[in-house]
Image (cartoon, helix red, strand yellow):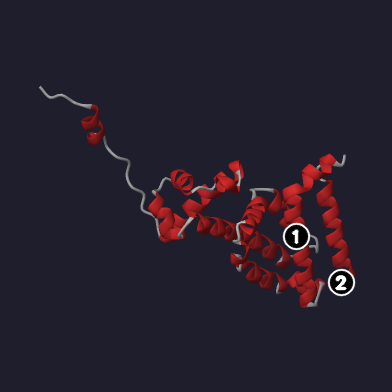
Amino acid sequence: MVVLTKMSIEASAPRPPRIRRSPEAARENILAAAEAILVEQGPQALKLADVAKAAGVVHANVIHHFGSIAGVETALMERMIRQLAEKIIAGFDGEGATPGFGARALFDAFEAKGAARLAAWLELTGEGRRMTLVREVVDAVVQTRLAREVVADREAVVDVILLSIILAVGVGLFGPTLSDLLGRPPERARELALEMIQDRISDRV
């Protein structure tokens, strides 16, 4: 008579097949899981164990690809920046683009997906200066058709981008809350910030 214990049953149970991914796909899987946690719970919830569990991998896998949870945070911010840059650059090089397109795209990005909170979190934890990708993105935007046509001076373009990012992050973090506290509609902070950016662009046209 064979006695099946709980341990023997679990040992004999078929295990789910291991998913083999390329290094790029493995990184993307981990970052997608981290982004889901970021959106739902905020950057303070980005813990190594939770990211690994959400991605369906072991801790060592996350460490192998990113070194630490700080590496995940930085890579996640870079991923968001790249996605935003691709959208802005495509829009600026397309027909019918307007000067305010890039600013609106920035505000959309920082008001959604927890990007503003992650940017602030990286700065507060001393990781902000690791975001060297921002310079590459700015250089790419400066070279777009719209940027060259609307504001020929490179330094003026960079100033507009700097102003846009600072205002977009601020609105993403505090806009609706402060608007409500001051008796304004939740979108009022965004409207005022976009007006300020548009005025800056108009002065340079």
Q: CA distance from mark 2 to mark 1?
A: 19 Å
**Within-10-Å neighbours for mark 2: few <14, some 14–19, many 20+:** some
Left or right position of 86 against 205: left
Res. 205 in view: no
Name the outermost residue toward the left.
Answer: 1
Left or right position of 115 against 204: left
Residue 199: numbered disc: none
In the image, what residue occupies the spot 69% across and 53% down? 110
x, y percent for residue 97: 77, 63
Left or right position of 67 against 197: left
Amino acid type, mark 2: Arg
In the image, what residue occupies the spot 24% across and 27% down? 6
For the residue labelled by badge 2, is the local secondary structure a helix, a strand or a loop?
helix
**Within-10-Å neighbours for mark 1: few <14, some 14–19, many 20+:** few
x, y percent for residue 175: 78, 47
Read off the residue under disc 1. Answer: 166
In the image, what residue occupies the spot 72% across and 49% down? 173
In the image, what residue occupies the spot 80% across and 60% down? 100
Q: Closer to the camera, 91 or 31? A: 31
Read off the residue under disc 2. Answer: 204
For the residue labelled by badge 1, is the local secondary structure a helix, a strand or a loop?
helix
Left or right position of 23 against 152: left
Numbered disc in front, either 2 or 1? 1
